[in-house]
Image (spheres, rainbow, N blue to C red):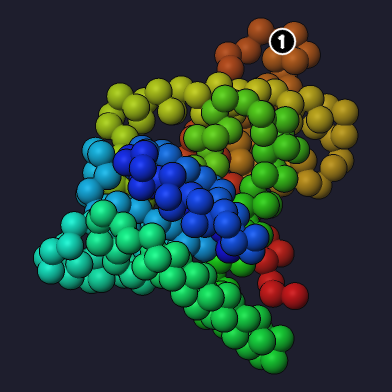
Amino acid sequence: MNFYLLQDDQATSALLRDLIENDFDNTLVGLTADPNRAYEELLQLRVDIMILPYQPHGMDGVELIYRLQQVNNHPHFIMVGPPTPTAKEAAYRAGCDFYLSHPLNHTEARHIIRQVATHVRLLNRVNRIYEISSSSIAPYNRPQATQRRQMDHVDTVLRFLGIASETGSEDIRKIIRVMIDQKASFSSIDFQRDFHADDHEKKIAYQRIRRALRVGITNLATMCIDYPENDILLEYANNLFEYQNIHVEIQRLHHQDVRRGQVSIQRFFDGLLQESARDQEVD
């Protein structure tokens, strides 16, 4: 089981980490005290079970669960918090599997972690059996598998364009992941809701993305010069940048005095979403 631990209390964090890692079937894939970092990392990692506090520093734990659910990210949750009926009710309403009262009882915490992990393993096995015996993947499992394939395809495109290691590539991955999860166009993305980012942070992210796309369009134009009849290159040129912008970049590379084309971020992301969905039929 892949666990992610969000905890700002050092003693509690150390106890939970020991309980998770003492089981050789478990892997702790992430550990932080920052809820915003936890949110961003869960968009990138495959997490089966997340353990989080009721009130992490800077954000309400229940709010974090709802934010993850809004982007179709659904790990199982174990929440640690005060032993009050109000807190427990809020946690269970948000979708927690178990609520552990703080301060933790070592024996109870170990039992609950094992019980939730066993439950998730059994659920995964049932879904694998159903997948094998059915002509289509079970609804519970299908979105996650499809999203992983789409993100793999996104990484392939970024590598092809030569921008997988550019600073703006992480911003590109975060945005396209939300678009894939929500099945939404770029214009539907709400930076405040989806990334907890204000207008200034959004502007900075756009600047990083534009710099990455400038590198990508130059690399693609260079490839189009070398392989003018390659259908894949022409497809990417049209879908991601509009061919006229590639044509302008080709002229620039030939040392012609032309003004650089305007790269549309919306065009790129909507095209990237379309590219990510190619060949996604279930095997």
Closer to us: 241 or 111: 111
Tell me: 151 left or right of 94: right
Tell me the residue that label 1 is attached to.
256
The N terminus: image quadrant: bottom right
For image coordinates 25% across by 56% down, the residue present is: 102
Is any atom of residue 100 visible in this view? yes
Give percent across and percent down for residue 227: 87, 34
Closer to us: 126 or 233: 126
Instruction: Find numbered disc 1 in the image and state the secondary structure of the residue it sits on.
Output: loop
For image coordinates 71% across by 86% down, the residue present is: 132
Give percent across and percent down for residue 69: 36, 61
Tell me: 60 left or right of 231: left
Tell me: 161 left or right of 43: right
Is any atom of residue 135 visible in this view? no
When the figure is inspected, residue 54 is found, relative to residue 8, above or below; the finding is below
**Within the image, what quadrant is residue 195 found in?**
top left
Give percent across and percent down for residue 247: 69, 28
Say what amino acid the circle numbered 1 marks.
Gln
User: How many marks overall?
Assistant: 1
Give percent across and percent down for residue 53: 29, 52
When the figure is inspected, residue 215 is found, relative to residue 25, above or below; the finding is above
Extreme-bottom residue of the structure: 133
